[in-house]
């Protein structure tokens, strides 16, 4: 009887805790962005990604993290409404100096993205002071709908350098 209970528990976790394709989507195509950054400035903004909940239910963001980051740490992640079809974009500072709609941001973790809606994912990154160049491949968004868990990687690669050619 103990074996049957363990099998039921294992199957339940596989179906309720699975990672995979969910209704959260990012734009088409991959983009690589280079942001010039002065050596004394360690803060950066990455807000090039639109996340879209294509599903019929709200989804809750559980975690935002970096993918293959070199010399960068994630300090904060926020969700913003898209203001007049303009994204926050990339900046060598935090908060971004010229971001339309700044002030309407909400913490990303715990945010419930309504069905059929688009939001701007914006992150605060901090460059390690020991390096002059830093990068990340993408951001990873982990989210839930009910008891199901999913993850998604964005399609923007960021390079911070003293100069971009």
Image (tube, grey):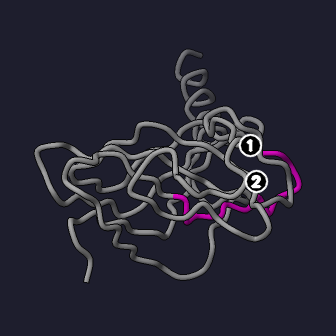
Cα separation, mark 1 vs mark 2, equals 7 Å
Q: Secondary structure at mark 2?
A: loop
| Side of 21 relative to 42 (left or right) | right
Taken as a whole, is the magenta stretch helix, strand or loop? strand
Contact between labelled residues 2 and 1, with CB atoms less than 8 Å apart: yes
Residue drawn at (48%, 52%) of the image = 140
User: On the rendered structure, is 47 left or right of 56?
Assistant: left
Residue at x-position 60% and y-position 27%: 9
The image position of residue 15, as x and y in percent, is 65, 43
Report crowding for label 2: few under 14, some 14 to 19, many 20 or more residues within 10 A (C-alpha).
many
Where is mark 2, residue-wise? 81
CA neighbours of label 1 inside 10 A, class few (<14), some (14 to 19), many (20+): few
What is the magenta range?
47-59
Badge 1 is on which residue?
Answer: 104
- When asked about the image quadrant of residue 109, the answer is top right
On the rendered structure, is 124 left or right of 129? right
Asked if 93 appears above or below 117 in the picture, the reply is: above
Q: Residue at x 30, y 67 (%)?
A: 36
């Amino acid at each position: 009887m103990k074996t049957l209970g363990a099998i039921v528990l294992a199957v339940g976790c596989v179906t309720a805790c699975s990672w995979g394709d969910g209704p959260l989507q990012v734009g088409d195509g991959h983009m690589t962005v280079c942001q010039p950054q002065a050596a004394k400035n360690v803060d950066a903004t990455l807000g090039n990604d639109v996340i879209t909940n294509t599903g019929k239910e709200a989804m809750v963001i559980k975690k935002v993290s970096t993918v293959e980051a070199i010399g960068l740490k994630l300090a904060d992640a926020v969700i913003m409404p898209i203001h007049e079809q303009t994204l926050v974009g990339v900046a060598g500072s935090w908060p971004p100096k010229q971001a339309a709609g700044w002030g309407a941001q909400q913490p990303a973790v715990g945010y419930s993205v309504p069905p059929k809606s688009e939001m701007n994912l914006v992150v605060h990154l901090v460059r390690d002071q020991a390096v002059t160049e830093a990068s990340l491949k993408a951001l990873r968004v982990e989210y839930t709908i009910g008891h199901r868990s999913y993850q998604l990687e964005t399609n923007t690669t960021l390079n911070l350098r003293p100069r971009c050619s």
